[in-house]
Image (cartoon, rainbow, N blue to C red):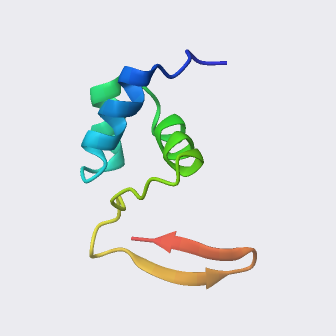
Amino acid sequence: MGRRWTDRDIEELRRLARQKTTQIAESLDRSVGSVVFKAYTLTLPLRPNRSSHVALEPGPAGFEWHE
């Protein structure tokens, strides 16, 4: 288990929410998964990390990313 989120970390996450998740994770010294999950538990929308050239196509278990 990683380190706990402090009130200061959460405040910083809210402030950075418009940046790419990879940038937020780097700023907070956390994994992207940790940032995404914490934002989800706070119902905080994040900016998608996707490039405009990435296509979304249905795969056998849902959607798969193809570049």
Q: Residue 40 appears at what percent x and percent y? A: 55, 51
Q: Could you tell me which residue is drawn at 57 percent across and 44 percent down?
A: 37
Q: Residue 46 appears at what percent x and percent y? A: 38, 56
In this view, which residue lies farthest toward the right?
61
Taking the image as shown, residue 62 lies to the left or right of residue 37, namely: right
Query: How many numbered discs?
Result: 0
Identify whether 52 is placed above or below 1: below
Q: Could you tell me which residue is drawn at 28 percent across and 76 percent down?
A: 53
Between 62 and 30, the residue placed more toward the observer is 30
Between 34 and 52, the residue placed more toward the observer is 34
Residue 4, visible in the rendered structure: yes
Between 10 and 37, the residue placed more toward the observer is 10
Q: Residue 21 appears at what percent x and percent y? A: 35, 47
Residue 29, visible in the rendered structure: no
In this view, which residue lies farthest toward the bottom?
58
Taking the image as shown, residue 64 lies to the left or right of residue 8, namely: right
Look at the image and tell me in which quarter the C terminus lies: bottom left
Q: Could you tell me which residue is drawn at 24 percent across and 50 percent down?
A: 19
Q: Residue 23 appears at what percent x and percent y? A: 27, 40
Q: Could you tell me which residue is drawn at 31 percent across and 38 percent down?
A: 24
Look at the image and tell me in which quarter the N terminus lies: top right
